[in-house]
Image (cartoon, rainbow, N blue to C red):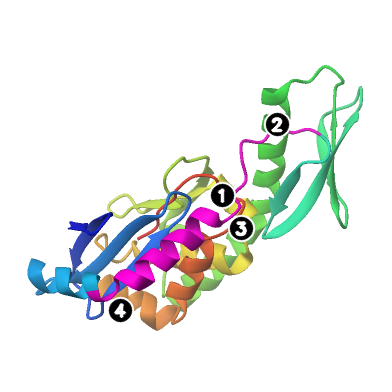
Amino acid sequence: MRIAEFDIEVEHKGIKNIHLAVYPPDGRVHISVPDYMKDDEVSMFLYSKLPWIRKRHEEVLAQERQDEREYISGESHYLLGRRYLLKVIPTTERAHIIKKVKYLEMYVRKDAGTERRRAVMEEFYRIELRPVLEAFVKKWAEAMDENPSSFEWSILLMQKQWGSCLTSARKIQFNLLLSRVPLRCIEYIVVHEMAHLKEHRHNKDFMAMLDNFLPDWQLRKKELDEFIALPMTMTAI
């Protein structure tokens, strides 16, 4: 839907309230509205919110975002929401990373290129993320009355989704990039994907589950959408 200078994504869903958001990094505007709302009603609402949309759009475009990493000394890298500086240290031993208070020390061969350093960082992220996910999955399996042995989960590097759930097969995949974001945001994604074990669609029953299990999920989602260490647009709902 075109409103003034904005092309706005409109999504009709089985929800009670309107959700309007402007997403980084490119200022994409999205609105979720109840199924019963007509296009002219949506249009009137959006025009009433146009000053807010313009202000938020400017704020999003002004946000600093991390560019493509080269994995060289001095770069900023994030782990579980905390910023670390990278130190690349030559070694003839096995490549590995040691976490210090303010630094991530990456030990690699002197001739290791960008792809090799990226692979070492991704393996480090996987090692750090797995116990966090294990703890959250265990916690929410109990809260949601799910048997942990009745479903599978894994970690995969994905480009456009924080997670995915194949409800029929009871298989969940979590994005490796969750290793960069705060624990609160990781927990939101765990709850989101585990709710899909019960309901595949983003309908009113699904939303009700999120509201029941994690009442502040929308705030956590906003924190996740705006996290500085994410150069790409990711989606959960």
Q: Kindly check if marks 4 and 3 are in contact, taking CB atoms under 8 A apart as contact.
A: no
Q: Magenta segment: does it hold 59?
A: yes
Q: Nearer the viewer, mark 4 or mark 3?
A: 3
Per the image, label 1 sits on a secondary structure element best described as: loop
The image shows residue 213 at horizontal and vertical percentages of: 43, 79
Q: State the quadrant of the N terminus.
A: bottom left
Identify the disc placed on residue 230. 1
The residue that label 3 is drawn on is 181
Q: Quadrant of residue 113?
A: top right
Q: Earlier in the sequence, mark 4 or mark 2?
A: 2
The residue that label 4 is drawn on is 208
Per the image, label 4 sits on a secondary structure element best described as: helix
Q: Magenta segment: does it hold 232?
A: no
Q: Earlier in the sequence, mark 4 or mark 1?
A: 4
Q: State the quadrant of the C terminus.
A: bottom left
The image shows residue 137 at horizontal and vertical percentages of: 53, 64
Looking at the picture, does residue 218 appear above or below residue 28?
Answer: below
- Real-space Cα separation, disc 4 to disc 1, in angstroms: 28 Å
Could you tell me the amino acid type at mark 3?
A: Val
- Real-space Cα separation, disc 4 to disc 2, in angstroms: 43 Å
Q: Nearer the viewer, mark 3 or mark 1?
A: 1
